[in-house]
Amino acid sequence: MIKYHPTQELLISHSGAQLPLSLSIAVSAHLEMCSECTTVTKKITAQQSALFEAQDVSNNVNFSSMLDKIFEHKPDLQVEPKKTAINRISVAGNNYQLPRAFSHFTDLKWSSFGAISRARVVKDTDNIRASLLHIDKNSAIPSHTHKGYELTLLLEGTFSDENGVYNKGDFIWLDNDLEHTPFTKTGCLCYAVQDAPLRFVSGISQALNPLGQLIY
Ligand SMILES: [Zn+2]
């Protein structure tokens, strides 16, 4: 069961198309897996469009142009093709089906370092980078903190850290200066968004630098 969700502010920004692509993908993919946030988002969208219409009326849209508007929305007879998720991926000997939010990214290139594999998905402005990360079973990412934020959306498998146990669909937002050591018993596939490189704890940062480069 999903325990960690995007904040209401994030859902509102997402509905208003105000998020950078990297985060918008994360929220969209979470919504595909979470009926609770889908319900909240529907309410937000309804409120936003009610507000928009109210503004429209207060902008003195006259009666005839309102009628024009109503009649210009003829029913669309074209049947939209059924959306099917096409993104099946194969990484480290495992096959996964990605959420539809990833269906534009058909050319994923994986790099590996030890138990960790990464495929870059998006590089946004402001140093925001988003990747798919796969961690082999019974493996950990060494203890680290973040200079910025780290969002992890768990797509398959489970992992745990000092703060809890995470399941498929969990949307985990960490701010800087929180130290953690994610470990996965089952192996897991995540979508990770960061706005700065990881900072490995105490003296091992040099040795692990390639891993830091890989993950960010
Ligand atoms: Zn949710």
Image: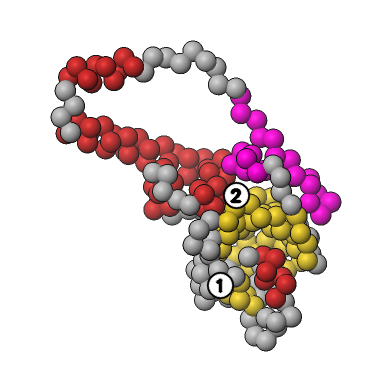
Judged from this view, the residue extending furthest toward the right is 93
- Residue for badge 1: 146
The range drawn in magenta is: 82-105
**Which numbered disc flags the more N-terminal residue, 2 or 1?**
1
Cα gap from disc 2 to disc 1, whole angstroms? 22 Å
Number of numbered markers: 2
**Which residue is identified by label 2?**
169
Q: Using the rendered view, name the quadrant where residue 59 is placed.
A: top left
- Identify whether 212 is placed above or below 189: below
The residue sitting at 56% across, 63% down in the picture is 194
Could you tell me which secondary element the residue under label 1 belongs to? strand
Helix, strand or loop at label 2? It is loop
The amino acid type found where label 1 is placed reads: His
Residue 67 at least partly seen: yes
Q: Is residue 117 left or right of residue 129?
A: right
- Magenta highlight on residue 88: yes
Which residue occupies 72% across, 72% down? 210
Vertical placement of 88 versus 20: above or below? above
The residue under the point 63% across, 65% down is 216
- Eye-nearest disc, 2 or 1: 1
The amino acid type, in three-letter code, at marker 2 is: Gly
